[in-house]
Amino acid sequence: MNHFSLDAEGQCVANQTSCSPGYFYLESDQSCQRCLTGCSKCTNATECIQCDTMKGFVLNATNSSHCIQSMCPRPHYFNHTTQTCQNCSSNCSQCLNSTHCHRCEEGFDPIHEGDSVTCNRSAHWNNSGNCSEGEYYEPWSNMCQPCQQSCKSCVGLYNCTSCVSD
């Protein structure tokens, strides 16, 4: 919002000290102009000196005159290289980066592999109702797999629960 005062020539001009947060005074236009996105205080259109921290913005580490949003909505994480919010890996509801999940979705367990933490279907989660007759649920592949030929139904490759009638 621009606030105006009367200058020596009888003209109404924007008052530099009264520009609202997120705006700066542009002398050539004698008006208040919007700062860059996420910036609450700036000296001009390209230089931010204070970010809107209440909305999750911080000064960019590689370009300290710009604000970046460091808090991303779930299930996303902030990628410092691209300076954008990125999706967590599949079945992950909260993550640090693309390979490190903090919290898996319901029915999924964290799997630790070196520095990575991903989410796989829980071995205790019963998905057998979603597999066709003659198939069993394989949690590691997250897919239905065929039973042995002699099994009508099974809970694993070598664990038949009923046999095919001769």
Image: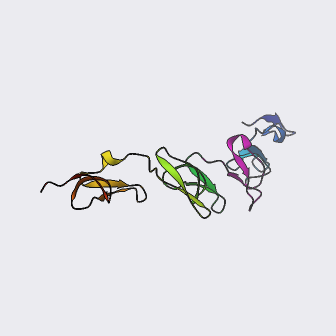
When asked about the image quadrant of residue 166, the answer is: bottom left
Residue 27 drawn at (x, y percent) = 80, 49
Residue found at the far left of this picture: 166
When asked about the image quadrant of residue 97, the answer is: bottom right
Residue shown at 74%/37% (left/top)?
2
From the viewer's perspective, is residue 95 above or below residue 82?
A: above
Residue 102 drawn at (x, y percent) = 60, 50
Front-most of residues 6 and 51: 51
What coloring was used for the rendering?
rainbow
When asked about the image quadrant of residue 20, the answer is: top right
Residue found at the far right of this picture: 8
Residue shown at 48%/51% (left/top)?
91
Q: Quadrant of the N terminus?
A: top right
Front-most of residues 82 and 39: 82
- Give the side of residue 86 with respect to residue 34, left or right: left
Residue 82 drawn at (x, y percent) = 62, 61
Front-most of residues 39 and 26: 39
Front-most of residues 149 and 94: 149
Specify start and end residues of the magenta stretch as a single range.
Answer: 46-72
From the viewer's perspective, is residue 4 above or below residue 149?
A: above
Q: Is residue 97 magenta?
A: no
Q: Is residue 61 magenta?
A: yes
- Give the side of residue 1 with respect to residue 93, left or right: right
Residue 30 drawn at (x, y percent) = 77, 45
**Numbered label tally:** 0
Residue shown at 57%/50% (left/top)?
76
Residue found at the far bottom of this picture: 114
